[in-house]
Image (cartoon, rainbow, N blue to C red):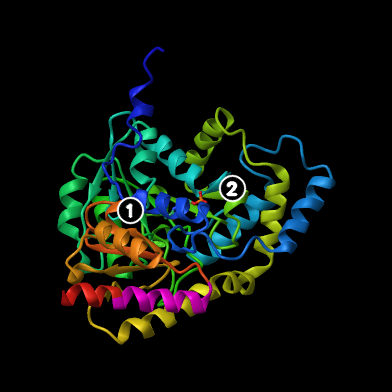
Amino acid sequence: MPALSTRITTLNDDGSDGWEVFYRARQMVAEGHQVTELTIGEHDVRTDPAILDALYAAAKGGHTGYAMVPGVAALRDHVAARVQQATGVPTTRTNVMITPGGQSGLFSAHMAVCNPGDTALYIDPYYATYPGSLRAAGAVAHAIQTRSRDAFLPQRDALEAAAQGARSLLINSPNNPTGTVYPTETLEMIADVARQHDLWLISDEVYDTQVWEGSHISPRALPGMAERTLVIGSMSKSHAMTGSRIGWIVGPEEVVARLIDLATTTTYGVPGYIQDAALFALQQGPDFEAKIAAPFLRRRALALEVLSRQQVVRAIPPGGAMYLMLDVRASGLSGEGFANALLDTHQIAVMPGESFGTSAAGHIRVAMTVDDDRFVAALQTLCDFAKGLAHD
Ligand code: PMP
């Protein structure tokens, strides 16, 4: 066989391991074991039947041919209005491209702004696909470390040191895996560094409907930022539509025009009936989105209650998203060691912090994606397990 491209063979080169805990849990489930899976970011409810009815009606109605590559006009208009309302930045359909999910948006945004070999920055801990997406676009992916004691918020000195000569910076608030929501001061600092170093800012806002404290602030709304910010949106988390593969990029008109060229040569857009269903889902309004987010808000409160009764496991303050980042260093184990031992002894699967980069070593990420009773019981077991180890 002739050699494969370096681009494809180095996609997964970020050196993070720890995913074997996830695969091992899946294997145990396949073998018939009862495992409480608190691993990936997938709701414990399926897409709402009303959205599926809209999808079916659109397909039956004939929207099964090629759809417009940048997205159907009505959906682009709706997304533009939504983003304008949230940010105050004038936004029209020419600023919006519909994408097959946020993941495609992340890749496309970096394709649009990075030349091969350009440095693309991202914050560690990070959503697992980030470094690969940046490398897929030909960029050199460079992680900026953060610290548990800063709630994993990026600090100005680290950002400035990395920004020299870089092309872009990818941020994510509310954050996966840490559950932190970037405060205004952090976003203003980031915007300041981006302006000073002439960086593109790629803002992954796929958890923007899951904010438990304060409110979601998009950096696109900050002074001088609309011209250098590309916002990644998705309906996966906000509307429990992970499998429908639908999201968007919002940015300057000139960039969107180029992104349409990219989509024409790659995905050729998103199925029309999925876009019609997405428009229907968005038209259900904020109450519907609050209903989808409600279980995580509820479980977060339950978790804080369980955690408040002990001193061994420390939570990073969970401002948003469907995860808890827990510091388990007092157990004496690494995140990976803890996750493996918890799976073996109690059949509870969590993600080691090490799977999201080096900054979250000694931590675990808990997805709040099982029903309340099971979730509370699992968290209590986890805390007791950590306590037992700490006393050994
Ligand atoms: N960004 C973040 C931070 C995520 O957690 C995810 C999914 N887990 C995505 C992007 C991609 O989501 P999707 O492609 O389903 O929109």
Q: Is residue 149 visible?
A: no
- Ligand 1 lies under 8 Å from the Cβ of mark 2: yes
On residue 270, the disc is none
Residue 152, x across and y down, in percent: 25, 63
**SS for tag 1?**
loop
Locate the N terminus and report the quarter of the image it occupies.
top left
The rendered magenta stretch, by its main secondary structure, is classed as helix
Judged left or right of residue 149, residue 17 is right
Residue 224 placement: quadrant = bottom left
Say if the magenta span includes residue 381: yes
State the residue at coordinates (28%, 46%). Answer: 16
Q: Is residue 158 left or right of residue 139?
A: left
Question: Horizontal placement of 246 versus 89: left or right?
Answer: right
Q: Which percent across, then down, holds residue 12?
A: 34, 37
Q: Is residue 218 above or below residue 197?
A: below
Of all residues shown, which one is farthest toward the top? 2
Q: Which residue is mark 1?
A: 126
Residue range corresponding to the magenta coloring? 371-384
Residue annotated with mark 2: 245
Figure quadrant of the C terminus: bottom left
> First in sequence: mark 1 or mark 2?
1
Q: Residue at x 38, y 37 (%)?
A: 113
55 up-or-down from 265: above or below: below
Q: Is residue 302 magenta?
A: no
Question: How far separated are the C-alphas under marks 1 and 2?
Answer: 21 Å
Question: Amino acid type of disc 2?
Answer: Arg
SS of the residue under disc 2: loop
Q: Is residue 289 visible?
A: yes
Q: Residues within 10 Å of mark 1 (few under 14, many from 20)?
A: many
Q: Between 355 and 121, which is closer to the camera in this rendering? A: 355
- Indicate the amino acid at tag 1: Tyr
